[in-house]
Amino acid sequence: MKKAINLSVNGVSHTDEVEPRMLLVHYLRDVLELTGTHVGCETSLCGACTVMLDGQAVKSCTVFAVQADGSTVTTIEGLAKNGELHPVQEGFWEKHGLQCGYCTPGMIVTAAQLLNRNPDPSREEICHGLEGNLCRCTGYQHIIEAVQYAAKKAGQR
Amino acid sequence: MTDNYVGKRVKRTEDPRLIKGLAHYVDDISLPGTLHVAFLRSIYAHAKINSIDVEAARSAPGVVAVYTGHDVATQIGPVPCAGALPDLKVPDHRVLATNKVYFVGHPIAVVVARDRYVARDAVDQIMVDYEELPVVTDVEQAAAGGPVIHEAFGDNIAYRLTSGEGDIDAAFAAADRTIKQRVLHKRLAPIAMEPRGVLARYFPGEQELTLWSSTQIPHLMRTQVALMIGIPENKLRVITPEVGGGFGSKLNVYAEEALLAWISMQLGKPVKWIETRRENIQATIHGRGQVGDVEIAFKNDGTLTGLRYSVFADLGAYHQLLTPAIPTLTGLMLSGAYKIPAIQMNITACFTNKMATDAYRGAGRPEATYIVERALDLVAAELNMDAAEVRRKNFPAPSEFPFHTATGLDYDSGDYEAALNKAQEIAGYAELREKQRKAREEGRLIGIGVSTYVEICALGPSQAMPAGGWESATVRIEPTGKVTVLTGASPHGQGQETSFAQIAADELGVDLNDVTVIHGDTGIVQYGIGTFGSRATAVGGTAVFVAIQKLKEKAHKIATHLLEADASRVSFEGGKFSLQKGAAAGAAAGGTSDPVVPVGEAPAGALPEPQTEGKSSLTLQDIALAAHVAKNLPPDTEPGLSATYFFEPKNFTFPFGTHIAVVEIDRETGDINFLRYVAVDDCGRVINPMLVDGQVHGGIVQSIGQAMYEEVVYDEQGQLLSGTLMDYAVPRASHVPEFELDRTETPSPVNPLGVKGVGEAGTIGSTPAIVGAIVDALSPFGVRHLDMPVKPENVWRIINGH
């Protein structure tokens, strides 16, 4: 039996009927066609599916869409404003913080939350903040530099 | 020719779509009416299938079809193996199991349903009556006559091979000393962040099939899948959209790819399968999997005289594309960066009740480097020499290149000592040793590990490859002057859309943004080999470079004609063909022509003829337009402006370098902490230093994983105990040190770019440095060798004598 949900995604409100077992990540990808959020493990361990749910970074592969009823969601597609990249996106481009790009949306969303909470993190704090997100390509060093770049850039704005 | 881009840190042109979440991986492509596929996989490592009952699944609401092994056995050919070795035993590897299953994860049946949830539910409704059979997971037991997996073969030995040159017995007989050490290379899971995925769409009217697959080898896949399902190759188009990492795991042709293609033809509908992570660890190839004994013979002054490696290679239950070939690559690199007059490799390659091993980043070469470097550390310990000095003593001098090894290779170029010196200088090696000595006096455990590796890259000359070792490129200048590069390489994160554009932009004197690099679509790109073996830039980049030279020759001919000048007086510079001073043009010399088709003012209908009269120079855009309008071309000139080149390398390339790791061990917990990590790599000429650094970082961290965390674990019953990312420990950001990278640059003579390749350097050069550092830290406890992954538990036991 389907259930109606109502939520705001990247500033646009949506009402849909979904099966109670539909995962939030599948709702975003398959129903709203926001395919920037990826599925990497289905067990909350890799972080590729990270989105902001009411301002908190969550792993959308282990949240049901019905749990997000009434919530505000921001995905990777909603980070750039008026065509201007989010400082974290800019940092990833500047510092070569991505290779294959698959973990990147989740990594960027997580890093954005990290900087919201701690605008001037140390290297260690960045590493700790990114522990829930796996990257197999970059070896993390350029990701860490990307977050440092974003922190500096955001501080200047 | 300009030098605006090559050698510079150019930001990637791939990135905007990726950082905005607008790129398309296989699962991001949705076609109307797509059906979803899920697999039933074996829960036993070895069992007879008495019966399969699919009725409940087939009649479940939303299920469209269910197929078992018997339904497809006569319809789809075997999963291909390209490894050709003398007397190799090749099991009949069907896309679905028929009468027996041979490993946990072996696909048995497939459900096609209206959505992925329904498909997975239906898989649970299939009933299989299994009869368990004895299992063999240990490779030495498999070799020694354990339960036979493929009965027709009589035993589990897939092949035996002995290779190497020099009189090995004499070398050992004459040595001052010898050391023998058992070395394990545990199985690893490649864990590309994007699991495998396939979308197949058959067009019944056109009788054409398009297959989107997350692969490193679109063209080879097209050929193989066409043969497997019996569709003409020119009716099959393989597209690799964005690929979320491969590391060798997608250098393959898997059962699922052929099966999805076939199902789409049966149903006339698009069908999609996206691998789950659990399936990815069960049924995507593993890497490594060797158990061997290394023996090294040497003189009392540290000079190496011989090396023997006798290894049991754990192939798994079936051959995937290159499974049997991987251990032979280990044999090729057993000379490492050293002069060793006699080398012998004895391989016993065995079937086990596990997933196949195959190419994982480095593919047989990390094993070789690890063996040789560990052996050098053992020699150093035995002779009480410094780890760096015993290496230095055995390097070939730069003047000895091309350097012939006793494994039958000719290393192209190298200056191993320069890289070692530079790394030692950056690390402050002498001070580090002093610091270590003092720390030991205080009871602290600091270790320094050194690895001076060499790798074999740019795979490779066709003679040495199963299916061609060349790479292709087409470079086209469109009528508007935009440059299109079609490469047969298939990058999936390495950044060749940028680095190939750098090459093209400099060679043609155009803006980087005017170059588009297209790859991974067999419907558009000429046949290619793909991206693996650190080959894309050295082989594929060279193909781009040479194609441009051909194209420039033609453009020069057209320019000469249009300028009505003598060919010798027309030169190409900065994107323009110009008359040299004093040369007589057909008309009075004027300025450079303006762009012929200004943006936003494209002509309606016919293309304008370029206005060349009276000009002393012509842009590439003028030439391209003239070549396409074709009203005024030199006699016997083909219209259009494109060139294709298939580059066949004469040799492999041999990048090298020195990695130095410094660790400190916590005596209380056994935790291993990096204090420093210095890497000096030499990958020949560098196109984009930022991309090279990224490749090195990523490779080292995969090595950290292998050295300290990662291990695919099967129990004695063949159950996979490390089937999720909870149990299979991929390094996280907090596990990695801050790397200190540098380079030496020794161009390769093998290709005109001088490029060697860097994709696998990190995974090849790094593990011995890390393990060497840990062993060195624990040397006060008499430790000379430890097996990977070295975990805090092992370390704690050593410290506490348990």
Image (cartoon, coloured by chain):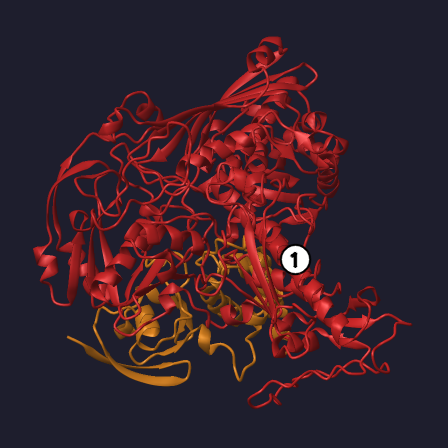
Chain colours: A orange, B red
Horizontal and vertical percent position of residue B331:
52, 29
Identify the residue shown where x is 63% and y is 72%.
B513
**Image x and y of residue B661, in percent:** 62, 39
Q: Report which quarter residue B579 is drawn in.
A: bottom right
> Secondary structure under badge 1?
helix
Looking at the picture, does residue B222 appear above or below residue B683? below
Name the subunit of mark 1. Answer: B
Instruction: Tell me where residue B652 sits by quadrant.
Output: top right
**Residue on which the image places disc 1:** B545
Question: Crowding at label 1, few (<14), some or many (≥20) Cα neighbours within 10 Å?
Answer: many
Front position in the image: B359 or A154: B359
Type of the residue with mark 1:
Phe
Percent of width and height locating residue B801: 46, 24
For the point 45% across and 59% down, the residue is B244
Left or right relative to B644: residue B386: right
Q: Is residue B236 visible?
A: no
Measured as percent of width and height from the top left, residue B128 is found at 12, 46
State which quarter of the image contains the C terminus of chain B: top left
